[in-house]
Image (tube, helix red, strand yellow):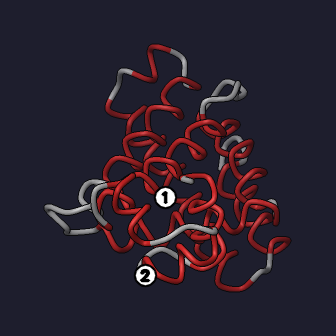
Amino acid sequence: MLEKAYAYVRETGISEMSLRPLATAIGSSPRVLLFLFESKDGLIRALLARARADELDVLTRTLPPGADAAGLAVWEWLAAPANASLLRLWVEAYARSIGVAEGPWAGFAAGTVADWLEVLARAQPPEERDSPDGLAHRTAVLAVLRGALLDVLATGDVDRVTAAVRRALAPGA
C-alpha cells in the first residue's frame, strides 16, 4: 500500500494530499489507510521516509573521490528527467518542513541536509573531511546542487544549468 501511495504522491504532490482521492487512486479506502498508518500524519511520515530512502539509495552509491567530483556525479542523477517526480516531491517536503518543530514534516529538511553532507564527506579524503574547510567545501557543493535543482525544476533548462554546475564544481573553480 505504501508503494502505491508513494507513486501517487510522486505524481500529485504531498502537501495538499487528501485521503479519499489517494485511497480511490490506489484501490483502497481511507479507513484502510488510517488502520495501516494510524493517521494522515502517520501516512505522511511514512511517505517522507520512503522518499528519503530513495534519495539515500542514490546518494550512497559509490561516488568518485572528492566533494566536487561527487557533486558532479550526484548532479547527473539530479538532472535526469526520470527523477523529476521524486525531486519535485523532495522540494515540496523540504520547503514544507522548514521551521516546523513538530508534526509529520518536522526535521525533514534538516535531515536531508545532514544526509547529503555525510555522503559528500565520504567522498573527501579523511584530512579534508575532518576540517572546517572540508565542511565548508561540501556545504558549498550542496548549495550549488540544491540551487541548480530548483532552477532545473522551475525552468526545465537542463543544459544551461548543467553547464553552470560543471563550471562551479570544476577543479580549481
> On screen, 17 above or below 162?
below
Say if residue 148 shows up in the picture: no
The type of residue carrying mark 2 is Ser
- Viewer-closest of 135 and 153: 153
For the N terminus, which image quadrant?
A: bottom right
> On screen, 160 above or below 68?
below
The x, y position of residue 149, in whole percent, is 62, 67
Whole-angstrom CA distance, mark 2 to mark 1, is: 33 Å
- Viewer-closest of 10 and 133: 10
The x, y position of residue 25, in whole percent, is 63, 76
Q: Which residue is mark 1?
A: 143
Element class at badge 2: loop
Q: Residue at x 61, y 52 (%)?
A: 3
Disc 2 residue crowd, few under 14, some 14–19, many 20+, Cα 10 Å? few
Element class at badge 1: helix
The x, y position of residue 144, in whole percent, is 56, 59
Q: Is residue 100 left or right of residue 147?
A: left
Residue lying farthest to the right in this orientation: 159
The x, y position of residue 101, in whole percent, is 14, 62
Q: Is residue 128 left or right of residue 35?
A: right
Between discs 2 and 1, the one toward the N terminus: 2
Quarter of the figure with residue 43: bottom left
Quarter of the figure with residue 16: bottom left
Q: How many marks?
A: 2
Q: Residue at x 48, y 42 (%)?
A: 116
Q: Which residue is mark 2?
A: 18
Q: Is residue 83 left or right of residue 10?
A: right
Which marked residue is nearer to the observer: mark 2 or mark 1?
2
Q: Residue at x 53, y 83 (%)?
A: 21
Disc 1 residue crowd, few under 14, some 14–19, many 20+, Cα 10 Å? few
Q: What's the mark number on residue 116?
A: none
- Viewer-closest of 140 and 172: 140
